[in-house]
Image (cartoon, rainbow, N blue to C red):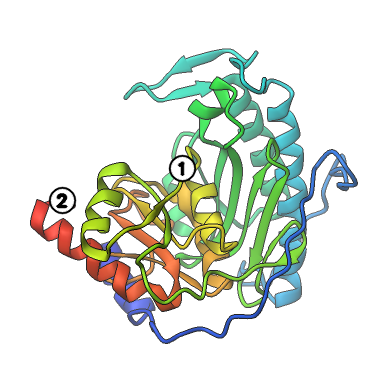
Amino acid sequence: MEPDAVELNRRLFHPVDLARFPVAERRSLRWSTRQGARPISARIPPARTSSAGTAGSGADALALREIMRQAAIAGGDIAMASFRPGQQTSARVRYKTGNSPVSDADEAVDAFLKETLTAALPSAGWLSEETRDDRARLDHDLCWVVDPIDGTRAYCAGDSNWTVAIALVEKGRPLAGVVHAPALGEHYSAVRGAGAEMNGAPILASPREQARGARVAGPGPMVDKLEHYTGALTKMPRLPSLALRLARVASNDLDIALVSAHARDWDIAAADLLIEEAGGLLTGLDGFRPVYNLRDPQHETLISSGAPLHGEVLEGVQDFMRRNGWT
């Protein structure tokens, strides 16, 4: 029988260490896929893997990140062909169960990424918002977790805050992650143990130690309730792409990001690694990190911040969740 997420998490990890992480000054660099980005090759050679089907050495993981980066850039270019800033997309749009939009661009990017990434690493399973779930992924230690356009509603309306999100998950945790926002010229990437980058420059999460005045984004009711506990907060736009909202914690453009229940693996896995490698934390209310590629890809309420601040934010969210009976 498959263990549930909480039990598997307890087997894999101890509760996060809230001790302060050393923080160095980060550099920032604006970067555009339209200026100087390397085009993806017509066919990407498969990455080397160990006999056990894992990504092997750190060098292999770095090579995979480069494949993921190029794939995300090319996928972003596919989506940009139908994107109209400030206007409705030229792509055909229809609605899934639950009134969630999906466009021809979502499906075109998804098909491209599946072909490219599975060719690069055939030993990995596949999980995507726009592909019918194949439970065979549960038999793989490695799994591609993809959202071809995270923030489809924004994309369709001409809002630039959407991303292409790609993670390679190994035994429940991200090994490499890329969040690409082509309409904003922002490109984030990380490899486990090798740090996180934005537009090629290292990034580090906020060293802030007190929540009062912190920059926060998330569902309005959650932000308002947290503010009652912490004191005045600096409320930032929620951002329709959840991957982008979390990436902004990694880049120290947000101090806190709140995520309501029912986010899926493809919404958060890539950004989770960005945050971890930047010295921040993304956890559930129990203080444990998310586990990915389980039978049910949904998650409960999540909280992200720089490590020094996480304990206070976690306590505040736990308090108002208990008071309001939220899950």
Residue 306, percent across and down?
A: 47, 71
Dot 1 crowding, Cα within 10 Å, few <14, some 14–19, many 20+: few
Question: What residue is rendered at 53% in x and 75% in y?
Answer: 279
Q: Work out how far the residue at label 2 is from the one at label 1, CA to CA, in angstroms.
A: 23 Å
Tag 2: amino acid: Trp
Residue 10 showing in the rendered view:
yes
Q: Earlier in the sequence, mark 2 or mark 1?
A: 1
Viewer-nearest residue: 77 or 314: 314
Dot 2 crowding, Cα within 10 Å, few <14, some 14–19, many 20+: few
Task: Give the side of residue 168 with respect to residue 33, left or right.
Answer: left
Q: Which mark is residue 237?
A: 1
Residue 160, percent across and down?
A: 61, 33
The quarter of the picture where residue 5 lies is bottom left
Q: Secondary structure at mark 2?
A: loop
Q: Are marks 2 and 1 in contact (CB under 8 Å)?
A: no
Is 233 situated above or below 306?
above
Q: Which mark is residue 326?
A: 2
Residue 270 showing in the rendered view:
no
Question: What residue is rendered at 82% in x and 49% in y?
Answer: 44
Viewer-nearest residue: 6 or 89: 89
